[in-house]
Amino acid sequence: MPLATAYSVSEAFGFRKGVGLDFRRAPVFYGLFTALLGVGVGVALWPGIPLIGLLVGIQVLNGILLPVILVFMLLLAGDRRLMGHLRNSTVHMLLGWGTLILVTGAVLVLLISQFMA
C-alpha cells in the first residue's frame, strides 16, 4: 500500500517516480514511501492496538473507496480521445458498470448493516 500510494501521489503531482531510480533522482517518491512505511510501522508497533481489527478496518475502508475509484477508471477507460483504439469495448464497459453497481450495492449493504446494528 505505501508503494502504490507513493506512485499515485508522485504521478498526480508530476514528480519523478520509480523503484529503478535512486533517492537523488526521485526524492519525493522515496520520501513519501519511507514516511508511509514509518507511519505503518509505528501504528503496528503501538502497544495495545488490536492488529486483526486494524487490518479488517483498513480493508473495509478500501472496499468503501473502491466504487469511487472504479467510476474514474471506467470513465478514463471509455474516453475515446484519451484511449484511442485501446478504448474499452461496449461489452467491457457494460461489465465494468455492472460490477460498479454490484460493488456499490455491497458497500451500501455493509454500511446499512453497521448502522442498524
Image: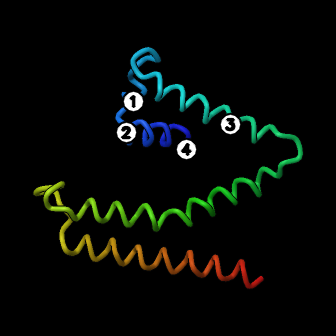
Q: Give the number of the disc on residue 17.
A: 1
> Which tag, 1 or 2, sits closer to the chain's start?
2
Q: Position of residue 53 (x, y in %)?
A: 77, 58
Instruction: Give the residue displayed 50% in from the left and 26% down from the top.
Output: 30
| Secondary-structure class at tag 2 | helix
What is the crowding at mark 3: few (fewer than 14 residues within 10 Å), some, or many (at least 20)? few
Query: In which quadrant of the rendered image does the C terminus lie?
Result: bottom right
Residue sticking out furthest to the right:
48
Q: Which mark is residue 84?
A: none
Q: Amino acid at mark 3?
A: Val
Q: x, y (%) of residue 21?
A: 39, 20
User: Residue reaching furthest front?
Assistant: 13
Contact, CB < 8 Å: mark 4 with mark 2?
no
Q: Earlier in the sequence, mark 3 or mark 4?
A: 4
Q: Secondary structure at mark 3?
A: helix
Labels 3 and 4 touching (C-beta < 8 A): no
Quadrant where the image shows the N terminus: top right
Q: Assess whether mark 3 and mark 1 are in contact (beta carbons under 8 angstroms).
A: no
**What is the C-alpha distance between the residues marked 1 and 2?**
7 Å
Residue holding disc 2: 11
Gap in Å between the C-alphas at discs 3 and 4? 12 Å
| Above or below for 39 versus 74 | above
Q: CA distance from mark 1 to mark 3?
A: 20 Å
Quick one: label 1 or label 4, which is nearer the N terminus?
Answer: 4
Residue placed most toward the observer, 9 or 85: 9
How many other residues sit within 10 Å of disc 1, few (<14), some (14-19) or many (≥20)? many
Image-quadrant location for residue 59? bottom right
Q: Which residue is mark 3?
A: 39
Viewer-side label of 4, 2: 2
